[in-house]
Amino acid sequence: MHITILELIVNEFQQEVAERIVAVTSDKRLCDSSIEFMRASIMSKYSYNFSWQGRPIIQYPQDIIAMQELIWEIKPDLIIETGIAHGGSLIFSASMLALLDMYDAIERGETIDPKFSLRKVLGIDIDIRAHNRSAIEAHPLSSRIEMIEGSSISPDIIEQVHAIATNFSRVLVCLDSNHTHDHVLAELQAYAPLASVDSYCVVFDTVVEDMPADMFPDRPWGPGDNPKTAVWKYLSEHSEFEIDKSIQHKLLITVAPDGYLKRRR
């Protein structure tokens, strides 16, 4: 197979990136600094300072970039998200799917109606507040978004989500609602199987396990009872998934250490 000079340059650069990511794990000073930043920034509600196309997203910029890379790599037809809040993450996912549609159309030499797409974002939340719903529905990308109100772990909601997912072939799952061990484990059991092979189930706020217990005095979760402990329990019984640690090593600043789960089979 003929390889162009450009491909050789790109491959060399990607190899250098991979080597740098591996090297990060042995840089104690850098790793310790990232942990200290996470502690300080969580206390200051740093993640609340960002928005995506006008809607608060409540995510760290590093994790947003990681999700962009995953969506571009996977090219999902459906993104399932538990936890909606202000809707910024739904808008982010919808904008990425719109870009995928645009590039598909360019490759085919076609034009597309920006309001039409077979690709969809499905958001689930136990309480979709009226002002947030209105803002999301008024957004130009709203036609790509479907929202379901109800507990993400109730049988009827799970049934609805599974029924919708049957219409899609490449599925990416993101879990970011109630952060207790039992709730996240139930979400993993319900929705992780919907992630396609070579896609991901991303579990946010696993960083709770690595933070001091007194950081969450008004929350039902904390060290020993959080998304990371749920991930570890789920993976002990589901070898089809594995933690993609290269992502957290690359990001350093992330709320999802051990939370980027790749489905291998």
Image (cartoon, helix red, strand yellow):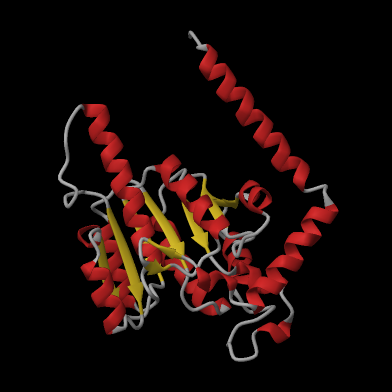
Residue nearer the viewer, 198 or 113: 113
Q: Say if 121 sits above or below 7 in the image.
A: below
Q: Say if 170 sits above or below 219 in the image.
A: above
Farthest residue, direction bottom: 218
Q: Position of residue 212 (x, y in %)?
A: 74, 79
Q: What is the quadrant of residue 218 in the picture? A: bottom right
Q: Say if 240 sits above or below 146 in the image.
A: above
Relative placement, left or right, of 38 versus 131 is right
Q: Position of residue 251 (x, y in %)?
A: 63, 52
Q: What is the quadrant of residue 236 in the picture? A: bottom right
Identity of the residue drawn at 63% across and 77% down: 44
Relative placement, left or right, of 47 versus 165 is right
Identity of the residue drawn at 65% across and 59% down: 253
Relative placement, left or right, of 22 versus 107 is right
Count of numbered tags: 0
Identity of the residue drawn at 65% across and 81% down: 222
Is any part of residue 240 visible from this angle? no
Farthest residue, direction top: 2
Residue nearer the viewer, 176 or 11: 11
Q: Position of residue 68 (x, y in %)?
A: 46, 49
Is any part of residue 8 visible from this angle? yes
Q: Position of residue 105 (x, y in %)?
A: 23, 34
Relative placement, left or right, of 124 versus 118 is right
